[in-house]
Image (cartoon, rainbow, N blue to C red):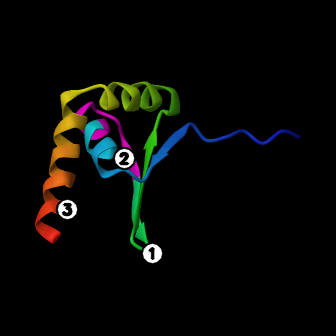
């Protein structure tokens, strides 16, 4: 018997997760284990498409700038 895979998308990237939420994706699990985030959303195909959209968007560039500024002030 073949096991059916769940139709979910998982990411550890906070920016991607926030983008998926703004696009209406349903978050079903959010956890933080050993300083690593895990966000699980319903709808693997839709979320994968939106994750690609995120990488090519101003949202991603904004998130990258925030990370760079955080690193700058840590020095």
Disc 1 + disc 3, Cβ < 8 Å: no
**Which secondary structure lies at badge 2?**
strand
Picture quadrant where residue 57 is located: top left
Q: Which residue is mark 1?
A: 34
Picture quadrant where residue 52 is located: top left
Instruction: Assess whether residue 25 is covered by the magenta stretch.
Output: yes
Mark number, residue 27: 2
Depicted 6 relative to depicted 28: above or below: above
Q: Earlier in the sequence, mark 2 or mark 1?
A: 2
- Whole-angstrom CA distance, mark 1 to mark 3, is 21 Å
**Which secondary structure lies at badge 3?**
helix
- The residue under the point 11% across, 66% down is 73
Disc 2 + disc 3, Cβ < 8 Å: no
Q: Earlier in the sequence, mark 1 or mark 3?
A: 1
Horizontal arrangement in the rendering, residue 47 relative to residue 54 (left or right): right
Q: Which is closer to the viewer, label 2 or label 1?
A: 1
Horizontal arrangement in the rendering, residue 57 relative to residue 32 (left or right): left
Q: Position of residue 35 (x, y in %)?
A: 39, 72
- Whole-angstrom CA distance, mark 2 to mark 1, is 21 Å
Horizontal arrangement in the rendering, residue 20 relative to residue 34 (left or right): left
Instruction: Assess whether residue 61 is covered by the magenta stretch.
Output: no
Q: Specify the segment rendered in magenta.
A: 20-28
């Amino acid at each position: 018997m073949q096991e059916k895979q769940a139709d979910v998308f998982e990411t550890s990237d906070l920016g991607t997760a926030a983008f998926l939420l703004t696009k209406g994706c349903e978050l079903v699990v959010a956890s933080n284990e050993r300083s690593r985030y895990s966000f699980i959303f319903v709808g693997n195909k839709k979320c994968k498409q939106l994750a690609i959209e995120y990488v090519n968007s101003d949202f991603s560039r904004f998130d990258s700038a925030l990370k760079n500024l955080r690193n700058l002030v840590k020095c």
